Amino acid sequence: MRYFRQFSYNVTLLGGGAVNPDILSQCVDLAPELVAADGGADQALELGHVPVAVAGDMDSVSAHARETIGADRFVETPDQNRTDFHKTLDLIDAPVVLGVGFMGKRLDHELACYNTLVRMPEKRVILVGEVDICFHLNGELKMALPVGTRFSLFPMARVNVRATGLVWPVEDLEMSPWGMIGTSNETNAPNVNIKVDGPGLLVILPRAHLTDAIAALTPPKA
């Protein structure tokens, strides 16, 4: 697998969907390396940012963006069996990736991004929207959050889940898209601990807790 490069810092990955400039600025502050997926290159320039790299099938990138950013920063990936989000993530090795411009606007594109999170469980990716953030959990999660925080669990596959620190108990609970789900739970203790027996569980939190999610997902330094 090839990478743009191995990033020492967190990466902000910008897509071509709905983007709030203030949210993008917040993400770039938290994840200073900006990478664009296809049409996200033009969005980056419009909002005053120049991405360090761009990937995708390039069907949405303008000639102006190509010229301004520089041809050496583009990696064209014409594979039509994967989304531009998937293809760009495939080329990034970073502690945590913040995905902006992938939630909101077109629902089919947004659903495809959630599918990608589950298909790439080795990646630590947080999708950031206007209201919520979403990330995939494979293994164990420990988070410190204020009591009363909305904390939703949504299965994209059949998984067995255990959780402490939530109002509605989750103890060896089998979840699946066609069975039990866990939306609109909330914290009742300052620490939440979740364990899942395999890939397929999405965690959804209010965007106000983005920094808490980054802290929880950041791997320990060697």
Image (cartoon, rainbow, N blue to C red):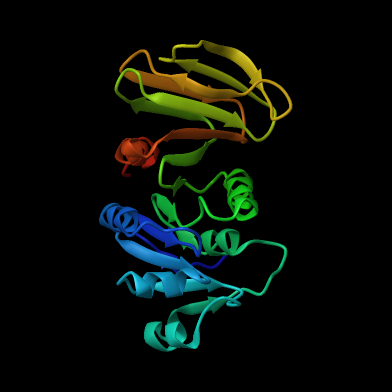
Q: Position of residue 3 (x, y in %)?
A: 49, 67
Q: Residue at x 56, y 60 (%)?
A: 85
Q: Position of residue 146 (x, y in %)?
A: 29, 22
Q: Is residue 199 left or right of residue 61?
A: right
Q: Residue at x 40, y 39 (%)?
A: 217
Which image quadrant: the C terminus? top left
Residue sitting at the far front: 105
Of residues 8 and 127, the one nearer the viewer is 127
Determine which quarter of the picture holds residue 202. top right
Residue sitting at the far left: 29
Q: Is residue 133 above or below residue 14?
A: above
Q: Position of residue 183 (x, y in %)?
A: 54, 25
Q: Is residue 159 above or below residue 13?
A: above
Determine which quarter of the picture holds residue 78. bottom right
Number of dots carrying numbers: 0
Q: Is residue 41 visible?
A: yes
Which image quadrant: the N terminus? bottom right
Q: Residue at x 36, y 27 (%)?
A: 143
Q: Position of residue 116 (x, y in %)?
A: 61, 50
Q: Is residue 51 visible?
A: no
